[in-house]
Amino acid sequence: MPAMAASMRTRQTLVLGLALFLLLVAFVAAICLGSTAIPLQSVIGALSGQLANGNPDFDIVLSIRLPRAITACLAGAALSVAGLQMQTLMRNPLADPFVLGITSGASLGVALVVLASGTTVGAFLSSGMGLGGGFAIVGAATLGGLLVLVPVLAISVRLQNPSTVLIFGLMTGYAVSAFVTLLVAGARPDQLERWIAWGFGSFSAVTWTELQVLAPVAMLGLVVACASIKPLNALLLGENYAGSMGLNTRAMRLVTMAVASMLAGAVTAFCGPIGFLGVAVPHMARAMLKSSDHRVLVPATILLGALMALLAQLVSLLPTNLGVLPLNAVTALIGAPVVVFVILRSRNGVFAG
């Protein structure tokens, strides 16, 4: 047993180390590669201040690619951790912000704030609202996500069949999306065009100003998720057991719901409704670690989520006749096979942890 435990710890250390190394490589590649390749030396020069302001490489690196890469890391980590929290809380392998309708609710919040003001996300932030406008959008998206998640979670307590809960979440999400469509139908053609582009998902439109809102919100959610590792491990054994160990399961549910909605809402507000990362990445982490222990699963999910988002961004920028590929299409190509594998591998749809 000690030898097996030591072997498992070694494996987990190697997995985390490899994930961190690949994340750093992908981050550098995301800055170097694009419509115009920039040499690594120029990237280092731009980041270190050796290149003069006004140099084309300096402007591309600092104004476009660096905020895009940071956004991808934050969004991938946030969505993946939110998915992990939902899968643990609902004991369902297919739970994630997109499937449970949180993303649709967040889109509703964004639509109510942005479309009702007669503008778009970027214009709303630059219309004098500043950071206050950014936090208003994130708050609206979070409340919208909670509006959908609360009834879904209430149903999950009463129903034993995880598939029924997922169907209820999907139907609730579709109903909310229909209401969003009604709001969008009354928008001006230029607003409608930008809203459709937002719906494709993108990390490229997030500026440094918007990152001043997205970064602290995402980091706060990730910190709270890391602080909830022990309660999440207790929930793996069931709420009755967790309650017998002194855990306030009701408070834990509320905190987990709020954090997951905040993470998904913030990403949806600025990057659009991005699917599949939340459901796929936690399963990748479990498969690589051979463990459901959140002490290693949470950091692995953060690293792999950021890595997969960066890879999706790189793939979406590959030169094609269609121009830039929709980010949602790329994440679907990555996540759909994982979802199919989970469905085929699960027994009667029950999450074994």
Image (spheres, rainbow, N blue to C red):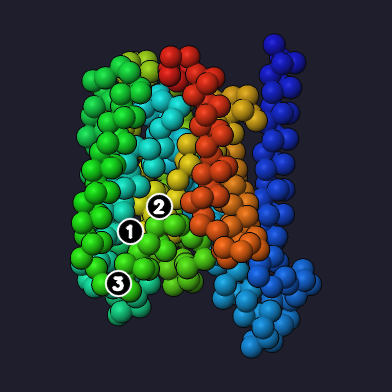
Q: Is 11 in front, or is 157? A: 157
Q: Is 178 in front, or is 306? A: 178
Residue under label 3, please give it: 189
Mark nearest the camera among 1 and 2 is 2
Specify which label sits upstream in the sequence, 1 or 2: 1
* Quadrant in which residue 259 is drawn: top left
Check the image and report above or below for 317 versus 50: above
Specify which label sits upstream in the sequence, 2 or 3: 3
- Alpha carbons under labels 1 and 2: distance apart: 13 Å
Count the marks: how many? 3
Residue 281 located left or right of residue 118: right
On the question of residue 123 being in view, the answer is yes
Please report the residue visible at 52 percent of the width from the left and 37 percent of the height from the top.
336
The kind of residue on which mark 3 rests is: Pro
Please report the residue visible at 62 percent of the width from the left and 48 percent of the height from the top.
307
- Alpha carbons under labels 2 and 3: distance apart: 21 Å
The kind of residue on which mark 1 rests is: Val
Question: Secondary structure under badge 2?
Answer: loop
Residue 346: which disc? none
Pointer 1 and pointer 2: residues touching (CB < 8 Å)? no
* Quadrant in which residue 56 is drawn: bottom right
- Alpha carbons under labels 3 and 1: distance apart: 25 Å
Check the image and report above or below for 262 versus 229: below
The kind of residue on which mark 2 rests is: Pro
For the N terminus, give its image quadrant: top right
Residue under label 1, please give it: 138
Residue under label 2, please give it: 273
Mark nearest the camera among 3 and 1 is 3
Q: Position of residue 105 (x, y in %)?
A: 28, 48
Specify which label sits upstream in the sequence, 3 or 1: 1
